[in-house]
Amino acid sequence: MTANTNIQSGKKKLLIFGATGGTGLQLVEQALEQGHTAAAFVRNPSKFNIKHTNLQIFQGDVMDFASVKRAVQGQDVVLSALGAPASQKDNVRSEGTQNIIRAMETLGARRFICLTTLGIGDSKAILPFYFKYIIVPFILKSAFEDSERQEKLIMQSQLDWTIVRPANLTNGERTGVYQHGFSATAKTKLKISRADVADFMLKQLADDTYLRKTPGLSY
């Protein structure tokens, strides 16, 4: 009954993966500011310092299906800001997301808002030459390949998904003013603050414009 009441009032129960990262922290903080109930999924609670009466902490590993399923139970919306350093050559994005999708489909949860990156899929064309042919192939190759697998899994799912593709992330302030859903020929600054990425992701809770779409995000 609580979840239905939350949905009717516009306040929802949100589960956030990648909650200790820069964007994940912004998602948690802004969700709480907006009156939602937030659940942060973290491997190490000691690294998570936010405290709030509407905040719940789930300790677990996104690579462990059982802990993911336990956290997804009873949530209205799942948001993911999963990531890893470029030097870390693992599949946390794709394999972790596969566990999230499986848990959501098993439990009947529908809405999934996931962060990837500009330059994946049909957004590759907007990247500048040096980034497209030097940075991605030689420095970010593993990360981009894992994000591509991640997006494919989401698109093949039965979920009501939105994949958010931001440009280069900064630690700037939340402005609420940015471009989204632009074409590959659009002129953008190819950067955006993590705070504004979180702002946009949370706006998708009440807006179906980008349902099953992959909007880019930049200034």
Image (spheres, rainbow, N blue to C red):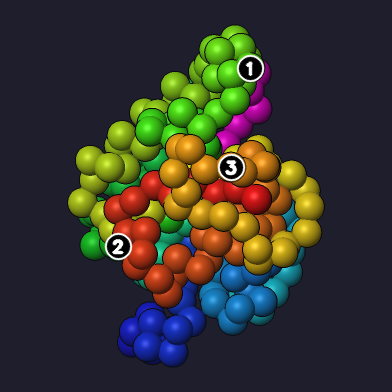
Horizontal side of 152 relative to 29 (left or right) equals left
Residue under the image location 46 percent in, 28 percent down: 125
Sequence-wise, the earlier of marks 1 and 3 is: 1
| Viewer-closest of 2 and 67 | 2
Q: Main secondary structure of the magenta part?
A: loop
Residue under the image location 30 percent in, 62 percent down: 109
Residue 16 appears anywhere in the view: no
* Residue 187 circle label: 3
Residue range (magenta): 82-88
Q: Amino acid at mark 1?
A: Tyr
Horizontal side of 130 relative to 174 (left or right) equals left
Sequence-wise, the earlier of marks 2 and 1 is: 2
Residue 132 percent location from the top left of the image: 55, 19
* Residue 130 circle label: 1
User: In the rendered image of this protein, does residue 45 appear above or below residue 13?
Assistant: above
* Residue 109 circle label: 2
Disc 2 crowd, CA 10 A, few/some/many (<14, 14-19, 20+):
some
User: In the rendered image of this protein, does residue 151 appear above or below residue 212?
Assistant: above
Count how many numbered circles sit on residues in the image. 3
Q: CA distance from mark 1 to mark 3?
A: 17 Å
Disc 1 crowd, CA 10 A, few/some/many (<14, 14-19, 20+):
few
| Viewer-closest of 64 and 77 | 77
